[in-house]
Image (cartoon, grey):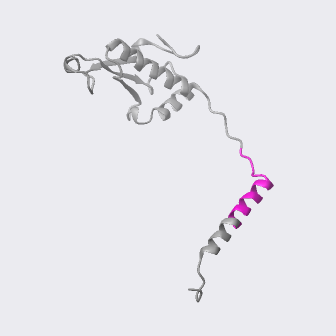
Amino acid sequence: MLQITHRIQIDESELWEQFTRSPGPGGQNVNKVETAVQLRFDVAGSPSLPEDVRQRLLRLGGRRVDSSGVLMIEAHRFRTRERNRADARERLAALILQAAHRPKPRIATRPTKASKERRLNSKRHTSANKRLRTTRPGED
């Protein structure tokens, strides 16, 4: 059981792990030991996630989510299978925790009179600088 928050818990049966050979340097060990892990989690079909969290997680997953709604996390940072497995689970938990946070709605505001005046003064100043740079016909 992967505990995310007090109301979100992911059952072990919803996680699917596959171990592969880790890319990159590491000597002979890399060529014979499968230490990298691919952790898959079916976001679209998971009964453990509330609907709002599911939608945000699908959006946050980006390229890691395939067309059927399965999130895949690859971990090969460490040299041992156990540490890579723990790393993948921590990254999944962090992503779900981020999706569980409901974003605060933006409240539209209007610019103040002073900020409008500063913007217009800045535009006048820039315009004046550019006007001074130009050469007038006959002044060459």
Name the image quarter holding residue 70: top left
Q: Please name the residue shown 19% across and 17% down the image.
A: 32
Residue 123 in the image: state x and y as whole percent: 68, 64
Q: Nearer the viewer, residue 81 or 121?
A: 121
Left-right relation of 124 to 34: right
Q: Nearer the viewer, residue 31 or 48?
A: 31
Vertical side of 15 occupied by 115: above or below: below
Q: Please name the residue shown 26% across and 25% down the image.
A: 25
Q: Nearer the viewer, residue 34 or 31?
A: 31
Q: Which residues are magenta?
A: 108-124
Q: Please name the residue shown 45% across and 13% down the image.
A: 11
Which quadrant does the C terminus fall into? bottom right
Residue 18 in the image: state x and y as whole percent: 30, 19
Left-right relation of 50 to 64: right
Name the image quarter holding residue 69: top left
Residue 40 in the image: state x and y as whole percent: 37, 23
Magenta stretch, overall SS: helix
Residue 60 in the image: state x and y as whole percent: 49, 33
